[in-house]
Image: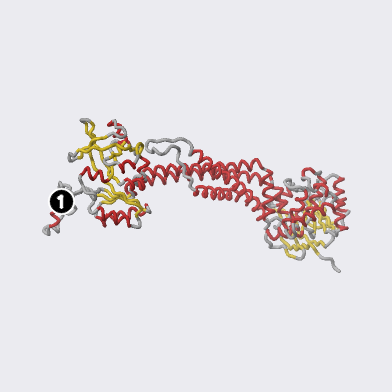
Amino acid sequence: MNIPLITKISISLLKARLKQTMVAAFGVTFSITMFIALLSFMAGLNDLLDNLILNRTPHIRLYNEILATKIQPINATQLFSSSYNFVQHVKPKEDILAIKNSQAIISYLQKDKNVLGVAPKLIVPIFYNVGIINLTGVINGIDVDAENSLFAFNDYVMEGNTIALKNIPNSIILGIGAAKKMLIQLGDNIQITTITGERFSLKVVGFFQSGIEELDKVQSYTTLATTQKILSKPNSYVTDIQLKLIDINKAPIIAIQYKELFSTEATDIQTANAQFETGSSVRTLISYAVGITLLIVAGFGIYNILNMMIYEKMDSIAILKATGFSGKDVNRIFITIALTIGIVGGLMGLVFGFGLSASIAQIPFSTASLPKVKTYPINYNPKFYVIGAIFSLVTTYFAGYFPSKKASKIDPVDIIRGK
Amino acid sequence: MEAKKIIEAQHICKSFYDPIEVKVLNEVSLTINVGEFVSIIGKSGCGKSTLLYILSTMDTSYTGNLSIDGVDMKGKKDADLAIVRNEKIGFVFQFHYLLNEFNNLYNVMLPGLKLNKISKAEIEHNAYEKLKILGIESEALKMPNQLSGGQKQRVAIARALINNPLIIMGDEPTGNLDKKNSDIVFATFKELAEKYHQSLLIVTHDNDFAEKSHRIIEMEDGKIIGN
């Protein structure tokens, strides 16, 4: 085996058909460029859409639900134990929505190895009083720091800030829809009434925009302590405990454990948002399919070029074989040509792909649901570049394989006698 | 003392089957010794070229025995035969078959580089030597398409010589050349045979050419009729 000699012959053959080989290489460049740009863009969009949900959704939510008692009085007696009991018009049991023993649960969860963070929450339905009109609303009492770090709460506050919410007593961050309806400015005071009839005055320190209009007309945020004060409840009174886990995939299993352990309801993110994962994976699949199709088309281009080259270089192949080059050597020469086209075209494709993604990332893109996003999202995952590089090599190898095999099978006697 | 045999062929038979069976070689046996200048003559289609390609190991579909330099060629693999051709046989064809992508010097060096037994610098030196024998060392760095037909053929002969082969085989090496260039090529062969004791086996239909060689093998209808 004589690698430098084979390489030298390959390169010379390449140079002899420089234009065609450049076209073939450009085919690979184009397909890799598109492959990378497409996947980066699609992954960027997927991340964006997933984060829309993931950022704001706890991996596990613990809460109490108003339900009918599972064991009805009739089940308590032995008299009808061998019969089926049909109880109609069962009413739900009167129960408090607050999680019992919440402090203990929170401190337990904070020590749990699976848990990334805990954010307690108190959800209270209220009325906003505007003159003589009452608008329905919901106040979320939150732990500002936990909400910021776990759910990027900060990103959705359009005016004002979350520090003010924490520092100014009796302050509120109002949903932007509700604020518009009530014609509220930053710094105004608003009146609210609880469902039990108590009135309360709160200072507006910010506006909140989730991107879901209906939600923004209703939701507003205060600190946990303020909400507890509105309800005149102790500081252990919370209705929800939101959890972020270290491994999101464990959420369904852990949710079941916690449900048993704390005797509350527990929902995990996968059950709550099953459709999102499906959407993401289908989009990814489509982008891969398109990218790989492009590469295969480029592969046919290389196949064509090599076939033509072999046809043109029959004489050269014949004399190489006559003077002692084996079929294997000839095969290697043409595989080298194919791989050179693949490597050069592929490398340029990686560079251009990065360039194209970077320029897509400069295109303005604004959406109401994502106030912080100003340009198209791009995911610069190195995985795409690795896949692109591997695929360009594999397709060019296979595109070169069959023509090379043909070249190695050429019988020099046929060629030489034909002259 | 008996001369050393380079090629020994016994009972070589070959047939073409397309479209009907035609026996092109029938029980051909011959030997070629070191230093001989042998020419094969015969009419078109008598099987002389076919015989040459069998003797050169390029054509492997035949029956009979062939040994080159005392080694039996029967049943050897493609890659092994390639090595034999590279090391022991030099070829000159009717057409020069130089690679247009390389200069003349590199064309001459190619089989040497493939053999890869001595350094590149030595191969280059040898290539210059061979070109000098053929009187065209001044054309070494030109491209093949800058040469005349006769010069190209001489470069091809230099290429055949580069690995100091046991024998040079030629298939109508002067077939494409005019009288003047034919004479030059013939003179070159003659010089190689007499001065350098190079063995040569040349297929030709040019009787003038053949008569100047040491031994003439005459063929007709797949058989040797005169030796």
Q: Quadrant of the N terminus of chain A?
A: bottom right
User: What is the residue that sits farthest to the left in this orientation?
Assistant: A79
Coordinates of residue A299 in the picture (x, y in percent): 57, 45
Coordinates of residue A2 in the picture (x, y in percent): 68, 57
Choose between B27 and B82: the one closer to the eye. B82
The three-letter amino acid code for the residue at tag 1 is Phe
Q: For the residue labelled by badge 1, is the local secondary structure a helix, a strand or a loop?
A: loop
Judge whether residue B19 can be spotted in this image.
Answer: no
Choose between B129 and B197: the one closer to the eye. B129
Residue on which the image places disc 1: A86
Choose between A204 and A288: the one closer to the eye. A204
In the rendered structure, the answer to whether residue A196 lies left or right of residue A292 reads: left
Judge whether residue A355 can be spotted in this image.
Answer: yes
Coordinates of residue A8 in the picture (x, y in percent): 69, 51
Coordinates of residue A161 in the picture (x, y in percent): 35, 40
In the rendered structure, the answer to whether residue B100 lies left or right of residue A68 reads: right
Q: Quadrant of residue A108?
A: bottom left
Above-or-below relation of A382 to B197: above
User: What is the residue that sits farthest to the bottom in this orientation?
Assistant: B1
The residue depicted at 32 percent of the width and 45 percent of the height is: A144
Q: Quadrant of residue A365?
A: top left
Q: Mark 1 — on which chain does it sit? A: A
In the rendered structure, the answer to whether residue B200 lies left or right of residue A373 reads: right
Q: How many neighbours does mark 1 have within 10 angstroms: few (below 14), some (14-19), or many (20 or more)?
A: few
Numbered circles on residues, count? 1
Above-or-below relation of A130 to B145: above
